[in-house]
Image (tube, rainbow, N blue to C red):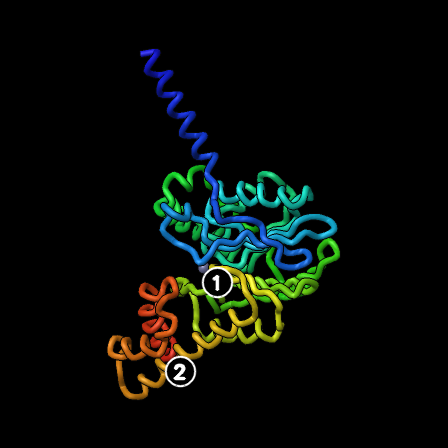
Amino acid sequence: MKRYSVYLSIVFCFYLQQAKALEWPDTHPEKIAVHTYVIEHGPHDEDPKVSHGFHNNPGFIVTDSGVVVIDTGSSYEIGKMILRKIASVTSKPVTHIFTTHFHGDHWFANQALVEAYPDVLTIAHPKLIALLNSGEDKFWLDVFAKRLGDDFAGTKSVIPKLAAENKEYKIGGIRFRVMLFDQAHTATDLMVNIVDDRVLFTGDIVNNEHFSFMGHGNFKGAYEATLKALELKPVKVVAGHGRSGDITLIQEFSEIYKKLRTEVAKYREQGLLDYEMKSAVLMSLNKYQQWSGFDTQIGRYIIQVNAELEKESFE
Ligand SMILES: [Zn+2]
């Protein structure tokens, strides 16, 4: 019996070591501007067995006084990985975390950073803070625990505390312009423009060759957000998902949001219902059919845009 329990504890330790050793082979902090790094992952595979829940693009900016992180990731383990990657670049402490929106893959990793740096300021859209504190975080905990299984082990909900403002923040000598959006990819979005580096973090309003779940969003608002983003003329763009790029990433999504609305509006005028217009609208977006999420998301987008236009017609 004793020997059996020794055997069990060896197996358990081995398992723990395996869990701790979890690494994401393609990830490295890539320096994309003077102060800005991205731990990027994309084009990504959302299958949790492949990604272990890591398929977004945490970014960090090394300022004179510390490190500002923009978006973390889906789990405690990913948060620890982010800390390791930051430590490979600088020994400065993490002083701020901005969260682009309330979807769990962008903030569940906050936990590891807050544990390591208890004084870190966690900043997000005021509606994100209100929503998650009203119990919405339990929904996301449940979704990610089911989706990630063991990879989500030990993850707790560490909700951002400070309400972001539509303004320019100056942190450690670097200017951060924050733009809030009440109706875009979700009702809780913000973008962060690193003014001195001309780098824009768009959150999931813009992705690279990937269509996100838009069920909490609004296509008119998302289109308008892309116009605001284009006005900033960023040199580098860090998308919510998929590799970082340049301003063409924003132009692409601006076109997609606009096209969805104009195409659906056209078929509405002809008296077609959403399921009757689906194949024609899909054809008009044919050039994006290789993008991840095309098969699963675009059909839903059409239904949602149709409902939005219906609602707008009564306003
Ligand atoms: Zn999202």
Judging from the image, what secondary structure is the residue with disc 2 in? helix
Q: Is residue 80 above or below residue 262?
A: above
Numbered disc 1: secondary structure: loop
Query: Can residue 77 be seen from the camera position used here?
Result: yes
Question: Can you see residue 274?
Answer: no
Q: Is residue 67 left or right of residue 228?
A: right
Residue highlighted by disc 1: 204
Residues 194 and 41: in front is 41
Q: Residue at x 32, y 72 (%)?
A: 303
Q: Amino acid type of disc 1?
A: Asp
Of 80 and 288, which appears nearest the observer? 288
Q: Answer yes or no: do the residues labelled 1 and 2 have beta carbons within 8 Å? A: no
Say which residue appears at 47% left-offset and 64% top-offset: 208
- The image position of residue 234, as x and y in percent, is 62, 69
Q: Position of residue 197 (x, y in %)?
A: 67, 62
Furthest toward the bottom, the residue is 270
- The kind of residue tagged 2 is Thr
Task: Residue 243 in the image: state x and y as whole percent.
Answer: 50, 60
Q: Quadrant of the N terminus?
A: top left
Give the residue furthest to the top. 2
Q: Residue at x 69, y 60 (%)?
A: 169
Would you identify the image quadrant in which residue 297 lies? bottom left
Q: Is mark 1 within 8 Å of ligand 1?
A: yes
The image shows residue 166, relative to residue 157, as above or below, that is: below
Q: Return the disc, 1 or 2, that comes first in the chain's sequence.
A: 1
- Tell which quarter ligand 1 is in: bottom left
Return the residue at label 2: 262
